[in-house]
Image (cartoon, coloured by chain):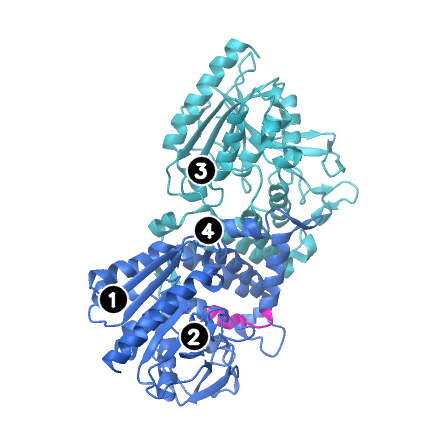
Chain colours: A cyan, B blue
Amino acid sequence: MNIETATVAFDELELECGVTLAPVDCAYETYGTLNTAKSNAILVAHAFSGDAHAAGEGGWWSNMVGPGKGFDTDLYFVICANVLGGCRGTTGPGSINPVTGCPWGMAFPAVTIADMVRLQKKLIDHLGIPRLLAVAGGSMGGMQALEWAVAYPDRVLAALPIATTTRHSAQQIAFNEVGRQAIMADPDWNSGNYYDRRPPARGLAVARMVGHITYMSDESMREKFGRRLRSSDEFEVESYLKYRGYKFVDRFDANSYLYITRAMDSYDLTQRGSLQTLFENIATRFLVISFTSDWLYPSYQSLEIVSALRSRNCDVAYVNLAAVYGHDSFLVEVKEQTEIVRGFLGSTFREGARGGS
Amino acid sequence: MNIETATVAFDELELECGVTLAPVDCAYETYGTLNTAKSNAILVAHAFSGDAHAAGEGGWWSNMVGPGKGFDTDLYFVICANVLGGCRGTTGPGSINPVTGCPWGMAFPAVTIADMVRLQKKLIDHLGIPRLLAVAGGSMGGMQALEWAVAYPDRVLAALPIATTTRHSAQQIAFNEVGRQAIMADPDWNSGNYYDRRPPARGLAVARMVGHITYMSDESMREKFGRRLRSSDEFEVESYLKYRGYKFVDRFDANSYLYITRAMDSYDLTQRGSLQTLFENIATRFLVISFTSDWLYPSYQSLEIVSALRSRNCDVAYVNLAAVYGHDSFLVEVKEQTEIVRGFLGSTFREGARGGS
C-alpha cells in the first residue's frame, strides 16, 4: 500500500473571503488503484486535527481504510488530502507568504469549509477523476462530505457525513472558542508570530485537553479512567489529558488550530437556503451515521440532515449506532461501521456502474 | 436584612492532610433571626466560585434566600460562610502565612470538603447553635451538605444536597483539570507567587470559560445565543464567554481555583465505606434535587445517593426537576425549587419542634 504523502501545487485558489491564494499546495495520499473507468475513487475527508495520512501505520482511519476494510482498497481508490489551512503539507498559516517570504501567521486569509472542498475539487480534477464514487468523513470531515454534495452534486455519487452537522451549535462554537482563547492567552503565541521561536505549546496543549474531553463520553471516561490514581496526587485522567495535550504540540500548528476551528464554526449550510431547498435537485445518495453517546455532535444534528433529505425524497440511509465512545466513536467503533459502509459503497458502486459515469 | 460580612478567627483547624492551620479566619453572613430555641438555623453552602454573600443584592442565591423565599428569612436564621481555601474572607492560599508574613501561595496545605465542613462546624459552635435545622447547597455546596450529614448526623436535622454527587466522575475531574492547567500554563501564575504582581488573568479567564460551558446546557446555550453574531467575526457566545471569563478575574484568586477544585475532585464519600454503610445510622432527613438538563452533575449521581438512602430506610425525598439551564438550574430555576424547599423545610421544622432539639 502506498503511504507516501504527495504534494501538488496549484497556481491559485480563490477563497470565499475574496482573497486569491497563489500558489496553493495540497498534500494528499492515495490507497488502492484507480480502475480504468475511473469510477472507484473515494475521497475521505479528515476531521479537525487529522491529515492526509488516513490509512496504513498511524493513519487516522487505518481501521476503516485498507484491504478488506470498510473502505476496501482492494476495490476502491481512496484519496485523502490535508485540508486548506492545515499544517501537514497543504497551504496554511504556517506556509510561506510569497509576498513577504515569511510565514503567513495571522495574515493568512480566512478559510472556509467550502474553500477546503474547492481545493479538493482541484485535486480530483488533477487526478483525472470525472466523478467520485463517494466522499466520506466524520466531524469536520462530514461537513466536507455535505459540502461536496451541495457544491458539486454531479461530481459525487454518494456522500457519507458521519457524526457531523450542517452548522455548529452555540455549545460547539463555545468549546472551540475556549481552545482559541487558550492559545491566544499564551504569550508564546505572540499574535501568531512564533515560527522562528518557541511555539505556544502550553496554550495549544490546554486547547487540546478541552477537545479530548468533548471527544469522549462520560461513560467511556468512566470505563477508561474512573477515579484511578496515577500517583498519590494525580488522577489517571489528568495524566492522560496532559500527555495527549502536550503530544499534540509536536504535530500541530497553533495558528492552524485557530483557522480551522474558525472554518468549522462559521460553516452554516442553512445560510444558503433551507436544507430542503439545498437538497432539492441532488441525485447524490446519502449514508448518514451518528453515535448514541456523541454529545459533541448529538444525533439530533444528523437527524436534521436526514429529515431534510427525506422531505425531498433523496436517497438516504441513516443509522444511529449504539456506541459508548462519544464523538470518538466514528474513529474507534469500527465493527458495525465497517459493515454498513461496505454495504452502502458496494450498492453505490453497482448502481454507478449500471447508470454509467 | 443584614448583609454585612462578618469574620470570626479561630485559633486553629486541624486538616485531613495532618497540617494544623493556626489561626483560621471564617467569613460569613447571616440573614433573619435566630429563635430563642435556636432551632431555626439553616446553613447554606456555596458552590465552587461562590462566597458568604448568599442573599441580598448580588447574592449568589438571592432568589432562594430572603423574606418569603424558599429559604424564608422571616422564619429561618440562614448562615452562609466562605469556604476554607477560598478568597473571600476565609483563610485560603491568598492569606498571610503567619510564619513567613507572606501569602501562602502554593505552600498552603491541601484542603478537603471535610475540612471545609469542620470549619463550618466551628462557626456553628461559635454561633451557639446546638443543631442546624438544615444544611443545603448545590454542586460543591451539595457535597458539603452530604458531608455534614455523614460527619455530624446529630448536628443537622435535614440535608439538601442539590445537583451534586458523592464523588466526581472522570469527566468532572477532567474539566477541572483543564481549568487548573490553563491557570498553571499562564506565566503570570509564577508557581502561585503573584500576590505582589500581575495575577494569571488570562489563564484564570480561560478556566472560567470552560466552567461556564459546563454549567449551561446545549439547549440553554441555543436559546441564549444560537448562532447570533456580535460582530462580523464574533459570535455572541464567544463574546459572552470572554466577558464572563475576564470578569471572574476581578473577584477570584487563581490559587483558590486550584485548591478548591482539587478539594472537589478528591472528595469521595464512598472511600469511607459503601454509601449504604455510611447512611446506616443517620436520622437526618434528605431532600435530594437534580435537574434533567444538568450534564455536569447528571441525575444518575443524585439517584445513587437516593438509592443508598432508601436501601437504609432513611427519610429521603427526591425530585428530578425538568429545567433547561443545565447545572446552572440550581441557581436560576427558582419557581419549583422554592415550593419544594419551602415545604420540606416547613415539615422538618415542625417535626424538629415536636421531637425537640
Label at residue A213: 4
User: Is residue A227 shown to the viewer in this render?
Assistant: no
Which residue is found at the position 47% from the left and 88% from the top? B99
Spatial CA distance of label 4 from label 3 is 15 Å
Spatial CA distance of label 3 from label 1 is 47 Å
Callout 1 secondary element: loop
Q: Residue furthest bottom?
A: B11
**Amino acid type for the residue under numbered disc 3:** Leu
The number of callouts visible is 4
Which residue is found at the position 72% from the left and 46% from the top? A104
State which quadrant residue B189 falls in. bottom right
Which residue is found at the position 57% from the left and 60% from the top? B206
Spatial CA distance of label 2 from label 1 is 23 Å
**Is A103 on the left or on the right of A61, as rendered?**
right
Q: Is residue B340 magenta?
A: no
Q: Give the magenta-colored segment's residue range.
A: B249-259
Contact? badges 2 and 4 (CB < 8 Å) = no
The answer to which of A235 and B150 lies nearer the viewer is B150
Spatial CA distance of label 3 from label 2 is 53 Å
Label at residue B315: 1
Viewer-side label of 3, 1: 1
**Amino acid type for the residue under numbered disc 1:** Asp
Viewer-side label of 3, 2: 2
**Is A344 on the left or on the right of A37, as rendered?**
left
Viewer-side label of 4, 1: 1
Which residue is disc 3 drawn over? A331
**Is B30 on the left or on the right of B305, as rendered?**
right
